[in-house]
Image: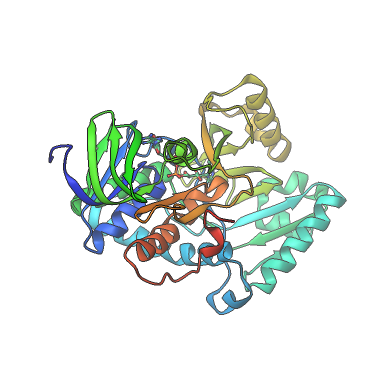
Amino acid sequence: MSSLNSTYDVLLVGGGAIGLSLAWELSQHGAKVGLVDQGPLGQEASWAGAGMIPAGPRKDFWAESTPMEQLASLSQTLHAEWHDRLAELTGIDNGYQQSGALYLAESEADAKSLDRQAEHWQRQGIECQPLDAGQLAKVEPGLAERANRFSAAYLVPQESQLRNPRHVQALIAACLQQGVDMRPGIAVHGFESTDGQIVSAQTSGGTIQAEQFCLTAGCWTGQLAASLGLDLPIKPIRGQIVLLNGPVGLLGRHVNVGKRYLLPRLDGRLLVGSTMEDVGFLKQNTATATAELLSFAASLLPSTAELPIETSWSGLRPATADGLPLMGRLPQLKNGWIAAGHFRAGLQLSPATAVVMRALMLGKTPEVDVAWLGCSR
Ligand SMILES: Cc1cc2nc3c(=O)[nH]c(=O)nc-3n(C[C@H](O)[C@H](O)[C@H](O)COP(=O)(O)OP(=O)(O)OC[C@H]3O[C@@H](n4cnc5c(N)ncnc54)[C@H](O)[C@@H]3O)c2cc1C
């Protein structure tokens, strides 16, 4: 490893899925990249997330899609490509698979909004099939006992999932191969800037210089921006997950009911998620949320009540005021960038974020126009 006073083309602050994906992408385009993280790499929200990858619109529907939807579409393509490339380069299979998803509504009001969502999917070329109770029981036999209780049900076959802890390990290995200088355990406390230009980052390990700097620090990014005199609030929204150890094949695809979900892994593990809690930077599991999640699981799949709990965890989603990420140049700084605030979709959108940010930072026109996601909105 080189010494901490190295000069990089780009210094990334934060090594979650967003920072690591961008580091990999920039390094493959010839940039000398440094990346620091105040903790171990990839152990915060990007480890804690469930790894669901909702489907995006088909490319021929982009003209009617928002930039967020275009990012989802681009990510869907990239996730499949990155899975293959990362496995080939690193030997790590991130578990990406198109497992499909069910969306269920429990009340008439929820059914109406799900029907509207389904119309929107269809307008965007995203396949979705309405299911009556009989069809639902056939598609997902585990739900047969309760299939009558839903006011609406849709199958979205193109939804995917990945094992995000493996994905970040694959990204770390790929970054190492590309010569990215990664420094876990180094916190950035502030920056030195003159004439609208960041000169260096002040870190717990000394000063680091770079030509360009990008804030990829998840829910901590607002604090870093504040150290540059910028008001870009991003707050943590806690999500708790309980992991059950079930038999293989208990469910074939993930099941969404409002903001709650059951996500089956191929090895039989079943993630039960999640909560949305505005409790600051407090990462812990609570008895109430654990009980609620388990009761939700048993209400869909009664047999889960008898399954062993393998573990539980919580993570902090990075949330902006409008729920959309901040991507682009930092205000009033020629060489400062931000890619943060991806809230509930950071794993999903990480490859497209990396590709778009790499283009912007290297002076190219990105595939998706993300001006709308900039800091001035
Ligand atoms: C329970 C839960 C379920 C989720 N499910 C999904 C899902 O199914 N699909 C999906 O797409 N998304 C999901 N998400 C959201 C997703 O996990 C996040 O949007 C995403 O991981 C954010 O990535 P990030 O790299 O921006 O942040 P993080 O992964 O939090 O990484 C930020 C990094 O910055 C570092 N850092 C912070 N401050 C500093 C500093 N001053 N100096 C140096 N380093 C610093 C941190 O240590 C951390 O490693 C979920 C999240 C949770 C909590």
- Give the image location of residue 194, x and y in percent: 32, 46
Q: Name, please, the residue furthest toward the right.
A: 108
Q: Nearer the viewer, residue 95 or 287?
A: 287
The quarter in which the N terminus is drawn is: top left
Q: Nearer the viewer, residue 230 or 315?
A: 230
Name the side, left or right, on which 86 lies relative to 280: left
Q: Name, please, the residue furthest toward the bottom.
A: 60
* The image quarter in which residue 234 lies: top right
Write the residue at 69% across / 71% down: 122
Write the residue at 52% across / 35% down: 316
Name the side, left or right, on which 126 lies relative to 191: right
Asked if one can make out residue 107 in the rendered structure from this viewpoint, the answer is yes
- Give the image location of residue 25, x and y in percent: 31, 59
- Above or below residue 146? Residue 309 is above
Q: Name, please, the residue furthest toward the left.
A: 2
- Above or below residue 9? Residue 76 is below
Asked if one can make out residue 133 in the rendered structure from this viewpoint, the answer is no
Name the side, left or right, on which 89 lies relative to 113: left
Q: Nearer the viewer, residue 144 or 56?
A: 56
- Give the image location of residue 59, x and y in percent: 53, 75
- Give the image location of residue 157, x and y in percent: 59, 63
Q: Name, please, the residue furthest toward the top.
A: 287
- Above or below residue 62? Residue 289 is above
